[in-house]
Image: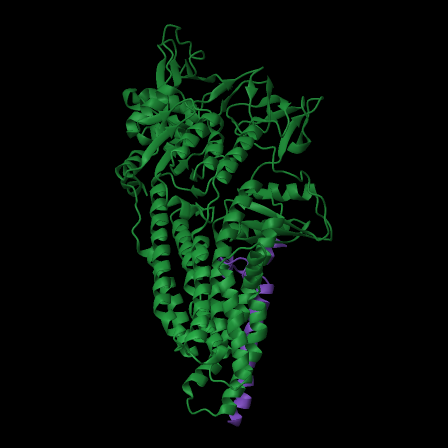
Chain colours: A purple, B green
Amino acid sequence: MTGLLFLIPAALFLGLIGLFAFLWSMKSGQYDDLDGASYRALFEEDEIEREGK
Amino acid sequence: MDSMAVSKPENIPEAGGVEHFLVEGLHCPSCIREIEGTLQKNPHVRNARVNLTTGRLAVEWAGGNQKSAANNDEVIETLKNLGFKGHLFRDDPASAAGDREGRWLLICIGIAAFALMNIMLLSISDWAGTDMGTQTRGLFHWVSALIALPAAAIAGMPFYKSAWGALTSRNLNMDVPISLAVILSLVMSVIQTVTHGQNTYYDAAMMLLFFLLIGRFLDRKMRNHALATAHNLINYRPAKATIVTGNGRTEDCAIDLLDTDMVVRAAPGERIPVDGIVIHGTSEVDTSLVTGETLPVRVGEEDRVFTGTMNISSPLDIRVTALSGKTLLDEIIGLMETAEQGRAKYVRLADKAAHIYAPAVHILALATFLGWMIFSSVGWQQSLITAIAVLIITCPCALGLAVPVVQIVASSRLFKSGILVKAPDGLERLAEIDTIVFDKTGTLTLGQPEMANGDSIDPKALELAASLAKSSTHPLCRALIVACHERGIPTIATSAALREEPGMGLVATIDGQEVRLGNRDWCGVPAEVKDNNRYSELWLKVGEQDAILLTFQDRLRRDAEEVVSWFQSRGFDILLLSGDRPDVVTEVAAKLGITDYLASAKPQDKIRRLEELKAQGRKILMVGDGLNDAPALRAAYVSISPSTAADISQNAADFIFQSQNLDSIIRAYQVSKSSRRLVFTNFALAALYNMIAVPFAAAGYLTPLIAAIAMSSSSIVVTSNALRLNLTRLYSSREGADRS
């Protein structure tokens, strides 16, 4: 039964990591543009950089 | 076209160097790249980012506070050069608050999900471990309490607030039983935990919150989408006019700063921004959006022109006579507001259900408590626990999800077939209609002229006419080109010198002969040739030969007849209310088999007819596009506009369809009808579930395990029932299928 003393906090800790990851992703605006992101993956980043500057 | 709704003509610099723009015509990945890449070359811009979901562009200025009208114009100009129409986006406090609320709901869902998963972990071992020691069980309960209490305090906020609001205004909504069930089950669980009892309901309370938050979030998302659509439409309006100053120069001026007697120049292809009198220039004006009249009207000096009409052929200088707030447009807006007040407030299905459900549940719980108190000797604690169990098991989970899930499935299905649901309750209202009122121009017809007598004219003559018409932007010339394409006649612009006389026609000398294309005066048509009222006309005169008449008429949408008869065969009354001339309207009505029609109808006439029908208890669907339809769109029970409609009309309408075909209306109706059916089956399922579960709970047989299973299974049943909407076959007109 002493295992529980480790396992329950471990489960809670992992859950909390998930919760904070979710809150962080929301705060950093990752849910703002759901349609554009799928296209942006196809751009060559350095190409935009070169065209841009 | 517009003079209202613009409160901030010039952008006032504020702290923070980010400006938002609306971009029209965004649809592909390369658009993002082009816009962002080009803008980043601009030294004033530090960063530009396009949001494809909202169709907005955020521009961060370089070097601190550089927000200025000049910079904004530069961005809009850049967008224009790339082929997009950009507008400065003015943030609306209401929609910003909506955004924040949506984010807050999402956070609540995250917290509830975290709490639910961890409590489930403990609860399942609790249910499975029948030989578990009292102390271990106690530990599990305490840990659960530690997670559930703070989580429920935060994640339940949206429900507690709404329930409190309802109670303080002496009302009952769905959130009252929800809040009571959550709070009471937590209180009971804490009592059980303290007294080392067997049954705790932490998991049930969290699950209830989790499922209901999802339903709430979907509902909010749908409403926000509708709001944002409407808000984007308002922002699409131009806020500027070109004024001609005393010394003949032109400059841009915000519409709000215009004054009477100022002179405004309207370029060809632009909407006239003011009501006024023409002081210089002759042109043709397309008034179809304002009056429903199909033919372009010729205007010259001293003629009156109205806001929102389109200048077709040549620049006009207009002296402003009515200021913003007093234009024809404002009159129409006034009519719309009156119409709005006359519209009965619609009570949504979910609210209707709540009005029956909430008292029923509370009476049931009370009866359970009293029953146990009177007919048994278990004492008040046990009676109370049983009563709370009833409240938990009647959890409005299924009811809370019943409507939003169906609506979100329905509106995404409609979106895929080119129909935008603007009003959140529009689908519910659309399902109840029994009468359909159509406008003619731009609704049943495409609002574009089509050649009527192309087959009876010598192809050689058409080819010659096309060689002149090719270089004009006049709508009739374009229709002529289209007619040639359809007949396989080549359309090559003549290389000879060509002159265009505004409001008259074109002339060129080809192979030594003077060729004229234009109106009857231009081509010297003898006065004894009778005027025709039915068609728009162009004349072609080659040398000294007799002029040839080319006639054009507004074309019916290809499936108009089919759609009208579809509705007629299902017992709907169809009306046609048009502002166009009687002989044209009569002809269209006869062609479509509509017996009830009204021609030359002003906006007031349309409303009066709708009011008469409403007085007879009819529920009317209004389909219209013009400014003159906007009040009627508001007055009707529910309304649909094509996406080519005037901005004001699009704002007034509950639905907007994008296709060239009218069958969108049938599809919208079908979807609304089946979603209504699904909502009712969902209610029935929820009721059935309660009928089975409540007796068990009232008899005291409810365990936390049963509660958890009942709750999740009822939610899953309701959701999968809603997904059946994707299986219904939608109507598609034969003509439409041929074309696309």
How many numbered discs sit on the rendered protein? 0
Q: Nearer the viewer, residue B708 or B41?
A: B708
Please state, as top left, top right, bottom left or bottom right, where the C terminus of chain B lies in the image. top left
Q: Position of residue B554 (x, y in %)?
A: 37, 27
From what the image shows, is residue B574 above or below residue B693? above
Residue at 42% over, 92% down: B131
Q: Position of residue B417 (x, y in %)?
A: 38, 48
Quadrant of the rendered image containing residue B78: top right
Residue at 35% over, 16% down: B549
Residue at 52% over, 72% down: B184
In the picture provided, is B9 more to the left or to the right than B547?
A: right
From what the image shows, is residue B639 above or below residue B284? below
Q: Residue furthest bottom?
A: A2
From what the image shows, is residue B285 above or below residue B631? above
Q: Nearer the viewer, residue B400 or B415?
A: B400
Residue at 68% over, 50% down: B43
Quadrant of the rendered image containing residue B320: top right
In the picture provided, is B402 more to the left or to the right than B251?
A: left
Q: Nearer the viewer, residue B720 or B612?
A: B612
Q: Position of residue B308 (x, y in %)?
A: 54, 29
Q: Position of residue B439 (x, y in %)?
A: 40, 31
In the picture provided, is B444 more to the left or to the right than B93?
A: left
Q: Is residue B4 visible?
A: yes
Q: Nearer the viewer, residue B30 or B510?
A: B30
